[in-house]
Image (spheres, grey):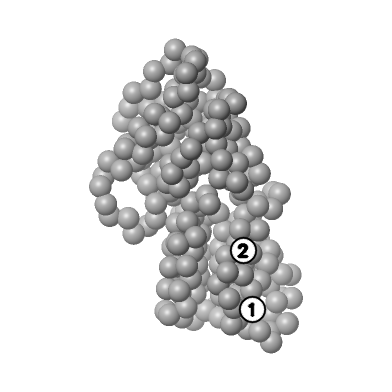
Amino acid sequence: MVRMRLLVIEDDPALGQVLVRGLTEEGYAVDLETTSMGARHMVEEVAYDALVLDLGLPDGDGITLCRSLRESGVTVPILILTARDGLSQKVAGLDAGADDYVTKPFDFPELAARTRALLRRPGGQAPTLLTVGDVELDPATHRVWRGAIAVPLTAREFALLYELMRHPDEVLSRAQLLDHVWDANYDGLSNVVDVHIANLRRKLSVPGTGDPIETVRGVGYRLVVDNPVDTVGS
């Protein structure tokens, strides 16, 4: 499972925590917002891979929020939560730009499966195969190759590589990587990104190839498209 980042928008404290805990166990980094205003701010600040949106919010309904996000150009997949007998709400949510819905009460495995399906859809945030230079990554099967050689990675290393491959030749700061691959509440070791980059470099060091990860001192890291054999990472 790719550790992508999700925003849960749910004002019920108990259900919100259930969703956060369950989706975190599925391998996602998950943030929780309880209001429409707070959710709008988070979407503006963070590049989420999907939103899980409850339609009943204290400062406005989710349908209005969904429509507003779409009108402002937000294309992130949106999964709405609605009452079992709320057919009109389902239709209204889809018409407002939602991609799918789950009815309440729901079984969590269904919500998890629908979330995975959204992230696999063409045109969404998760392409079926990423290729940068001679590195290939398949989000659906959680597999990585360096040329013809399979590279086994931990879930966190996979998520880190996935984020770098989404932005080839673009420098990502440690803060950006920490923010997206971990989550908003992480308060552990400050060098955790460097440690995982080192492990990732070691595993991608296939004989006869160069280091695809470049360190930009004082800034961060980037995955280079053209990596000469003799390149040495630092």
Is residue 156 at least partly visible in the picture? yes
The image shows residue 17, relative to residue 3, as above or below, that is: below
**Cα distance in 3D space between marks 2 and 1:** 14 Å
Residue 158 placement (x, y as % from top left): 48, 42
Q: Find disc 1 in the rendering and name its residue.
A: 103
Closer to us: mark 2 or mark 1? 2
Q: Is residue 124 left or right of residue 234?
A: right
Label 2, on which residue? 113
Amino acid type of the residue tagged 1 in the rendering? Thr
Q: Amino acid at mark 2?
A: Ala
Of residue 211 and residue 6, the one placed in the foreground of this image is: 211
Q: Is residue 69 visible?
A: no
Name the quarter where the C terminus is drawn.
top left
Could you tell me which residue is drawn at 49 percent across and 64 percent down? Answer: 23
Answer above or below: position of 64 versus 86. Answer: above
Determine the residue positioned at 53% across, 52% down. 1
- Mark 1 surroundings within 10 Å by alpha-carbon count, few (fewer than 14), some (14 through 19), many (20 or more): some
Indicate the quadrant where residue 132 lies.
Answer: top right
Residue 183 lies in quadrant: bottom left
Residue furthest top in the image? 230
Question: Mark 2: few, some, or many residues within 10 Å (few <14, many ≥20)?
Answer: few
| Between 128 and 205, the one nearer to me in the picture | 205
Label 2 SS: helix
Judge from the rendering whether residue 127 lies leftward or rightward of residue 38; answer left or right.
right
Residue 51, x across and y down, in percent: 56, 63
